[in-house]
Every structure is written in structure tokens, then in C-alpha cells.
Image: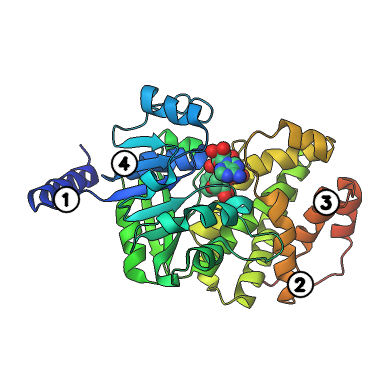
């Protein structure tokens, strides 16, 4: 047993001996990340109830300890059980973890809000911005659940679900306006392979997660067009610059974008064939139409919708986001990647700055 495992086992034993109950987490969403994160929480010592809307998925999890559609090779720990009953999942939960597609959060949470355990900390795993309102997920949670910012946390970082499900080492950020709540989330999901740091910069952490999906679409498009590593590195670097520019205009802290929620997640997502956003972009860059690309995409690629709300935020805050604008042009306005690239490269010359 490694030192940190031994420490954690000792903490759990001491907690049991002190008569403390194991922490309970409800995870709403049995997709790729909800399922993998449920395993992280259970590995960290939480009792976890997963809510899923599809009875056959819930049944498979409870009878085979596997979620065949998303993680056929991962055996879920004994501490995870699933239900289709939201009230059952939410009951007594110290942490209520939300992992449904961002654009469905508002409607889902409206139906769950009466069931939430009083005092629960709501934790968003989602990396999108709501269409129309341009609200970040934590803002939607506060508004719909009627809870203060001090009880709404965000868990983000370079966390491709398949790698976490394989228990490969990764770091993350647990962010909340209330540092103590951020620490509670950190402790609830800290395992020998999953190392969360804390932050109070919720705005920066959420923007890092949402905008990297848009930049990953751009990098995927470039890959699909057959462009090489210089193009990719330029998009990643200038993508981070425009993310930081938006973040600063919205009150985020600059260093967040150099950290796991910014640079870390951007690099992971833009480099990985596991990324749904990157793959979506690659298909577009290879010449598939939007409809063909949507048809072959089986999971949530948040950047496809959120590129519009990110651009909306940029306009509201008077910030230039040329890569985001280019992605919106290709994905939603039928612009050819070749024309869009030419336009991006022919912008006026500028000094390099964030
Ligand atoms: N998969 C990953 O590697 C990571 C994903 N995320 C974020 O986590 C969030 C969830 O993503 P994934 O689990 O990967 O997506 P997914 O596409 O794998 O799963 C989405 C889940 O939501 C369910 N769902 C779809 N529409 C719904 C609706 N209207 N109401 C209720 N449930 C609905 C699906 O049945 C599925 O269980 C996204 O915001 C994503 O950006 C964050 C980090 C890593
Ligand atoms: O957020 C992710 C990794 O941190 C997953 O990225 P995709 O949604 O593009 O698969």
C-alpha cells in the first residue's frame, strides 16, 4: 500500500472508530463522467447513489456492477448503487453531484430541487454555458436550487473519463466561493489516483472548462484538415489567451488559466482522441457535414452548443474571441473550414498579449 493509501485507510478507520458515518454522495447522470466520478467518490470512501433516467442502465449497474454503454471494462466499487428515483438518490446526500448535459441542467434541476437534502453541497461536473442566458452551470444551480454560492462547487480539470475509470493518475480542481466547502469536496474525492486541489475562483474554473471544449473543436478541425503541430500549438496558445481575456473581464483570476482548470484541461482535451469535442472537430475538418458529424457522435460534445453562448459572453463583455468566432462560423453558419482559416489568419497584425 502506498503512503497516501495508507493515510486514507487510517483516516477512514479513525472516522469509523469515532462513530462518524461515511459521507454520502448522490451523482445525477450515469453517462461517461458521472459513472467514472461515482467510482472516484466510492474509492475515496463515500457511499454513492447514482441517478440514471434509463432503467436498463440502472439495472445493469446494480446487477453487473458495470455501465456497459459507457465503461464496459470498469467494475464499479461496491459502494456505488444506482436508482431511477431522484428522491432516493438525493436522500441524506452530503454532496449532490450534477453530471447531465449542460443544456438540460435547468429542466432537470427544476424537477429535483424539492428533493435536495438540506445543507447538501451541490457539485457541478459540467463544462458548458447555457444557451440564451449565457449562464455558467454554477449560476444555473444557484438560481434553480435557490442555494447560496457558498454551497455550490465545481469540479474540473484534465479528467478524461476513460482514463479516470482506468484509475490513471490525474489532478483536478474543486472550486467554491466557500473555501471550507471546496475542501470538503476535495476530501470527498481524494484517492491515490485522483488528486484534487482547491480554489475559490469559480468563474475562472468554469470558463476554463467550457471554453477549452470550443478550442478543442478548433484543434480537431485543424487535425481533420491535415494541419500539423505548429497549427495545433498556435490554436492552443491563442485559445488560452482568449479564454484568459474573457475570464479577466468576468472577474476571474489570471493564474487559474495557467493551472489545471485552464492550461491543464486545454492540453488534455486538445491532444486526446478520447475527447468528444476534439473528435467532433476532426470529423468536421475531414469534410463531414454538421448533420453527419452529429449522427456519429454518441456522447455529449458540449462545445458544439456552448461555442454560441461563449461568444455571447464575449460580446456582452466586449472581448474579442476570434477562435471561438471561427468555430461558431464553421459549426453554426455553414462556413467552410478553409475559408474560416483564411479569415482567421488574415486578421490585422498585433502584439502578443493575453
Ligand atoms: N466524459 C468526460 O471525459 C468528461 C465530461 N465532463 C463533463 O461532464 C458532463 C457530462 O458529460 P458526460 O458524462 O461525459 O456525457 P455523456 O454523454 O457521456 O452522458 C450524459 C448522460 O446524461 C444523460 N442525459 C442526456 N440527456 C439528458 C436529459 N435531457 N436529462 C437527463 N439526462 C440526460 C445521458 O443519458 C447520459 O447518461 C458534460 O458537461 C461534460 O463536459 C467533464 C469532465 C470529463
Ligand atoms: O472535459 C474533458 C476532459 O477534461 C472531456 O472532454 P470531452 O468532453 O471533449 O470528451
Which comes before the other along the chain, label 4 or label 3? 4
* Residue that carries the numbered disc 2 in the rendered image: 315
Residue 15 x, y percent position in the rendering = 14, 51
Location of residue 185 (image quadrant): bottom left
Mark 4 residue's CB less than 8 Å from ligand 1:
no
* Residue that carries the numbered disc 3 in the rendered image: 332
Which comes before the other along the chain, label 1 or label 4? 1
Seen as rendered, the residue at the extreme top is 64
Q: Mark 3, residues whose alpha carbon is within 10 Å: few (<14), some, or many (≥20)?
A: some
Determine contact: label 2, label 4, CB under 8 Å. Answer: no
Residue nearest the observer in this picture, 349 or 282:
282
Q: Which residue is drawn at 81% across and 37% down?
A: 291
Q: Residue at x 54, y 47 (%)?
A: 100
Residue 167 seen: no
Q: Mark 4, residues whose alpha carbon is within 10 Å: few (<14), some, or many (≥20)?
A: many
Location of residue 297 (image quadrant): top right
* Residue that carries the numbered disc 4 in the rendered image: 42
Disc 2/disc 4 C-alpha distance (Å): 42 Å
Vertically, is 230 above or below 43?
below
In the image, which disc is placed on residue 11? 1
Disc 3/disc 2 C-alpha distance (Å): 17 Å
Q: Which residue is drawn at 55% across and 67% down?
A: 139
Disc 1/disc 4 C-alpha distance (Å): 15 Å
Quarter the N terminus occupies: top left
In the image, which disc is placed on residue 166? none
Amino acid at each position: 500500500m502506498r503512503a497516501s493509501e495508507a493515510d486514507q485507510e487510517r483516516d477512514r478507520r479513525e472516522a469509523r472508530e469515532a462513530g462518524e458515518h461515511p459521507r454520502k454522495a448522490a451523482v445525477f447522470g450515469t453517462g461517461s463522467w458521472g459513472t467514472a466520478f461515482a467510482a472516484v467518490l466510492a474509492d475515496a470512501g463515500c457511499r454513492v447513489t447514482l441517478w440514471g433516467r434509463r432503467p436498463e442502465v440502472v439495472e445493469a449497474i446494480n446487477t453487473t456492477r458495470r455501465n456497459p454503454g459507457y465503461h464496459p471494462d470498469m467494475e464499479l466499487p461496491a459502494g456505488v448503487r444506482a436508482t431511477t428515483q431522484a428522491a432516493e438518490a438525493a436522500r441524506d446526500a452530503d454532496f449532490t453531484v450534477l453530471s447531465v448535459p449542460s443544456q438540460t441542467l435547468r429542466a432537470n434541476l427544476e424537477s429535483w430541487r424539492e428533493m435536495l437534502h438540506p445543507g447538501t453541497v451541490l457539485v457541478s461536473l459540467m463544462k458548458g454555458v447555457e444557451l440564451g442566458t449565457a449562464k455558467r452551470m454554477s449560476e444555473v444551480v444557484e438560481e434553480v436550487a435557490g442555494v447560496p454560492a457558498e454551497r455550490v462547487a465545481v469540479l474540473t480539470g484534465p479528467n478524461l473519463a476513460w482514463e479516470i475509470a482506468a484509475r490513471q493518475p490525474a489532478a483536478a480542481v474543486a472550486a467554491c466561493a466557500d473555501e471550507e466547502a471546496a475542501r470538503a469536496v476535495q476530501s470527498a474525492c481524494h484517492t491515490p489516483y485522483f488528486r484534487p486541489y482547491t480554489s475559490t475562483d469559480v468563474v475562472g474554473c468554469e470558463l476554463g472548462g467550457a471554453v477549452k471544449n470550443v478550442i478543442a473543436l478548433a484543434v480537431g478541425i485543424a487535425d481533420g484538415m491535415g494541419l500539423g503541430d505548429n497549427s495545433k500549438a498556435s490554436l492552443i496558445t491563442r485559445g488560452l489567451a482568449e479564454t484568459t481575456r474573457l475570464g479577466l473581464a468576468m472577474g476571474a483570476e489570471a493564474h487559474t488559466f495557467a493551472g489545471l482548470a485552464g492550461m491543464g484541461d486545454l492540453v488534455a482535451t486538445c491532444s486526446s482522441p478520447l475527447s468528444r469535442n476534439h473528435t467532433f472537430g476532426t470529423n468536421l475538418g475531414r469534410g463531414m457535414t454538421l448533420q453527419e458529424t452529429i449522427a456519429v457522435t454518441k456522447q455529449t460534445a458540449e462545445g458544439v452548443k456552448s461555442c454560441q453562448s461563449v461568444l455571447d459572453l464575449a460580446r456582452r463583455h466586449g472581448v474579442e474571441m476570434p477562435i471561438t468566432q471561427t468555430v461558431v462560423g464553421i459549426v453554426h453558419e455553414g462556413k467552410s473550414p478553409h475559408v474560416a482559416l483564411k479569415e482567421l489568419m488574415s486578421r490585422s497584425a498585433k502584439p502578443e498579449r493575453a
